[in-house]
Amino acid sequence: MAKEEPRSISRDLQELQKKLCLLIEFFQNNPKVMAFTKSPLGQYLDRHPFLALALLVFIVTSAVPVGFFLLLVILTTLVALVGVIILEDH
């Protein structure tokens, strides 16, 4: 029974590797990605991978507060609109 576990783990890892390779290939063959990698910014980030990673982390982490801010703006606008409608009724 102990001999079967490493084989199943090995098979799972091979399947995961195949899926990851297919995903990477899909992104590399995407026309928008190809156009970006040929642009000057894409070539610069390709030569500086740490900067590309730092930029990606910054964008992902800043998306959460920006999303909360936009949600707050929309909710405030809706509440103000409902308040104006209620005040105009009376």
Image (cartoon, rainbow, N blue to C red):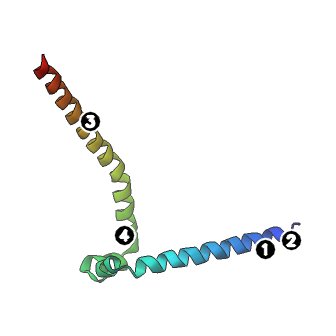
Residue type marked 1: Arg
Spot occupied by residue 68 in the image (x, y as percentages of width and height):
32, 43
Residue 3: which numbered mark, if any? 2
Cα distance, mark 4 to mark 3?
Answer: 35 Å
Residue 7: which numbered mark, if any? 1
Pointer 2 or 4: first along the chain: 2
Where residue 81 sits, quadrant-wise, is: top left
Q: Nearer the viewer, residue 19 or 6?
A: 19
Pointer 4 or 3: first along the chain: 4
Which residue is label 4 attached to?
52
Pointers 1 and 2 in contact (CB under 8 A)? Answer: yes
Cα distance, mark 1 to mark 2?
Answer: 7 Å
Spot occupied by residue 84 in the image (x, y as percentages of width and height):
14, 26
Crowding near pointer 4: few (<14 within 10 Å), some, many (20+)? some
Spot occupied by residue 63 in the image (x, y as percentages of width and height):
34, 52
Spot occupied by residue 73 in the image (x, y as percentages of width and height):
23, 39
Pointer 4 or 1: first along the chain: 1
Residue 75: which numbered mark, if any? 3
Residue at 57%, 74% (x, y): give it: 19
Where residue 87 sits, quadrant-wise, is: top left
Residue type marked 4: Ala
User: Where 20 sits versus 89, above or below?
Assistant: below
User: Where 34 sits versus 51, above or below?
Assistant: below
Cα distance, mark 3 to mark 1?
Answer: 54 Å
Cα distance, mark 2 to mark 4?
Answer: 42 Å
Residue type marked 2: Lys
